[in-house]
Amino acid sequence: MDPSPRPAVVIDNGSGYTKMGFAGNVEPCFIIPTVVAVNESFLNQSKNLSKANWLAQHNAGVMADLDFFIGDEALTKSRCSSTYNLSYPVQHGQVENWDAMERYWQQCIFNYLRCDPEDHYFLLTESPLTSPESREYTGEIMFETFNVPGLYIAVNSVLALAAGYTTSKCEMTGVVVDVGEGAAHVVPVADGYVIGGSIKSIPIAGKDVTLFVQNLMRERGENVPPDDSFEVARKVKEMYCYTCSDIVKEFNKHDKEPTKYMRHWRGIKPKSGAPYSCDIGYERFLGPEIFFNPEIYGSDFTTPLPVVIDKCIQSAPIDTRRSLYKNIVLSGGSTMFKDFNKRLQRDLKKIVDTRVLLSEARLNGEIKSQPVEVNVVSHPIQRFAVWFGGSVLASTPEFFTACHTKAEYEEHGASICRSNPVFKGMY
């Protein structure tokens, strides 16, 4: 059966969430946490049994495979029973546990998407700093375990740019500010190719915002059960946090009218089932502020995000810089805070304008510089922009010719997955 008439499967595995669905759709079919839960009792049983008792050892291993959950099911199992051990196969954008990742993909394909992998081409995503060896592992699993007919591994930043496709404008030059749950990267892309030497990585991401909100609520003595505090902080971050224009003014506003800006959280204690409530105050704007004033979170990293973006563009080839400033694309759930794009554009514009004025002052005004246009692009689907970009690209005829096929894998081996061609016909 020729799989090319069928829609390709697009899976974006992030550190926090996995987005999956079929090419041609506007939204992913499923968005689930990238987490697995394994029943430790079966694992320990198979380890402790002697080699002579191979049948019992095999049966314990089979039961461990069956008693394996991913996503929200895994989180629920771990809360209800202490025998389940949570594991996060993707850390900081990189796959750390390949065995868990393979089983995770297995459940994604068969339990969620409910498709036969032999009938669909696959598009998977990767971080811009992923090693070629990781691509080989991915290729081996997809071709050997799932027997897929074709595979394309795309850099998530390029897909985020592709998500901005419209009928009138196909801009494949820009800077992608990708801030997810566990990793944050600033990646310049020129004509669909990543400028590798200019990539900047930031050790602050969505999980850090959650931890900061959790610490603020704990220090204020809010009545949140310790075993539920991280989950409450995550929901507070997603539901109530926003980006302010001036942190001092925001403090004054909250102090003058606390009832106007204060929010209330009501929950149920996981173990006892008793209800509880707490107030949400300054953390509403202090959470996202760690991207603009990281020193309030810790002393290890103190460079604001706008400065990182400016350094990234300044280290790129000089003939691309104006185009890069003009198309700064936001991607990832941690860029979804209200007014995040406006604050980022304002702060970055200040840095650029100050540099232009200084250069003119050095030349005593003899040469007037052209103003530099700074534009931060925000759109409603930026939470899953990478997945949507993959959906767009995997819907084109060029995708099937760009994919590595099962026949190529059998002839040349996993090394073919080390590089994936850019679709030159797309722009």
Image (cartoon, helix red, strand yellow):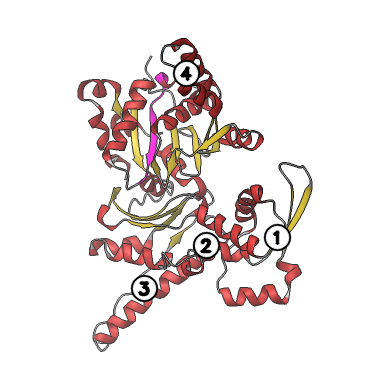
Farthest residue toward the left? 412
Q: Crowding near pointer 1: few (<14 within 10 Å), some, many (20+)? A: some
The residue lying at 62 percent from left, 73 percent from top is 250
Disc 2: which residue: 340
Image position, residue 1 (x, y; %): 38, 14
Could you classify mark 3 by the number of other residues whose Cα lies within 10 Å: few (under 14), some (14-19), or many (20 or more)? some
**Taking 155 as reference, is 11 above or below it?**
above
Q: Position of residue 191 (x, y in %)?
A: 28, 50
Question: Which of the pair 246/401 is nearer the observer?
Answer: 246
> Residue 71 versus residue 377: which sits nearer the camera?
71
Q: Which mark is residue 84?
A: none
Badge 3 or badge 2: first in the primary sequence: 2
Asked if marks 3 and 1 touch (Cβ < 8 Å), the reply is no
| Of labels 3 and 1, the one closer to you | 1
Q: Where is residue 134 in the image (x, y as percent from the top left)?
A: 31, 37
Observer-nearest of 60 and 330: 60
Quadrant of the rendered structure where residue 119 is?
A: top left
Give the residue pinned by disc 3: 352
Q: Is residue 204 above or below residue 293?
A: above
